[in-house]
């Protein structure tokens, strides 16, 4: 094909992350899970569909660690797991007196894990709080979209 003709052909329109996820949601392909913990253990967890088979793509994985009004010395570790293997991790440390009023949240630490991971039927993506102290609250959220196996996820 003549390179000039190829150059003059209209380009595919780029869409923002929000537009992309809105399209996936309107197609019924978007899934989310949110979990709040004050102790160690599993946070947000999603499994790629098995009936029918689905591939699952990670659009967003985030943990928000909230520190309430208190005297606090400690840390919190959150890890992103795919099929039991750690693929990303964050560690948050606070020391000293935190004061901000009567019983509300004083500080928040937000960490966004890597994204764009793909898992296949039956595989699991989850965020796990592996180290925590009683006075921290960790909220984890996963946002994924699913496609039939072999289907190109681009719009």
Image (cartoon, rainbow, N blue to C red):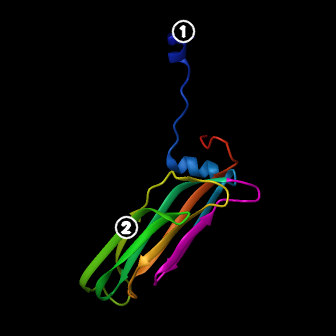
Residue 108, percent across and down? 36, 73
Q: Is residue 4 above or below residue 64?
A: above
Residue drawn 48% across the image and 54% down it: 115
Q: Quadrant of the N terminus?
A: top right
Q: Secondary structure at mark 1?
A: loop
Disc on res. 90: 2
Q: Nearer the viewer, residue 28 or 136?
A: 136
Total labels: the figure holds 2
Residue extent of the magenta highlight: 34-54
Position of 18 relative to 34 (above/below): above
Residue 30 as seen in the image, left or right of residue 5: right
Q: Quadrant of residue 12?
A: top right
Q: Nearer the viewer, mark 2 or mark 1?
A: 2
Q: Is residue 18 left or right of residue 56?
A: left
Comparing 17 with 131, the one in front is 131
The numbered dot on residue 107 is: none
Q: Secondary structure at mark 2?
A: strand
Q: Is residue 96 left or right of residue 57?
A: left
Can you give x and y, in whole percent of width and height, for residue 75 in the image? Answer: 33, 79
Query: Image point 70% across, 48% down: which residue?
Result: 148
Q: Is residue 122 magenta?
A: no
- Neighbor class of circle 2 (other Cα within 10 Å; few <14, some 14-19, many 20+) is some
**Residue 38 highlighted magenta (yes or no):** yes
Q: Residue at x 54, y 33 (%)?
A: 13
Q: Is residue 40 above or below residue 83?
A: below
Residue with the most extreme top position: 2
Q: Quadrant of the C terminus?
A: top right
Residue reaching furthest to the right? 51
Which one is in front, 40 or 155?
A: 40
Please tell me the numbered disc located at residue 2: 1
Where residue 67 appears, as percent x and y from the top left, is: 36, 81
């Amino acid at each position: 094909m003549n390179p000039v003709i190829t150059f003059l052909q209209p380009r595919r329109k780029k869409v923002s992350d929000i537009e992309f996820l809105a399209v996936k949601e309107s197609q019924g392909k978007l899934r989310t899970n949110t979990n709040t913990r004050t102790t160690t253990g599993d946070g947000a967890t999603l499994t790629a569909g098995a009936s029918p088979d689905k591939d699952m793509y990670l659009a967003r994985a985030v943990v928000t660690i909230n520190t309430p009004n208190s005297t606090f010395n400690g840390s919190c570790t959150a890890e992103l797991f795919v099929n039991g293997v750690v693929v990303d991790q964050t560690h948050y440390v606070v020391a000293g007196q935190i004061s901000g009023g009567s019983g509300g949240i004083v500080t928040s630490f937000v960490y966004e894990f890597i994204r764009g991971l793909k898992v296949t039927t039956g595989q699991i993506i989850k965020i796990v709080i592996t180290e925590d102290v009683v006075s921290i609250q960790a909220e984890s959220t996963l946002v994924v979209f699913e496609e039939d196996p072999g289907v190109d996820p681009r719009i």
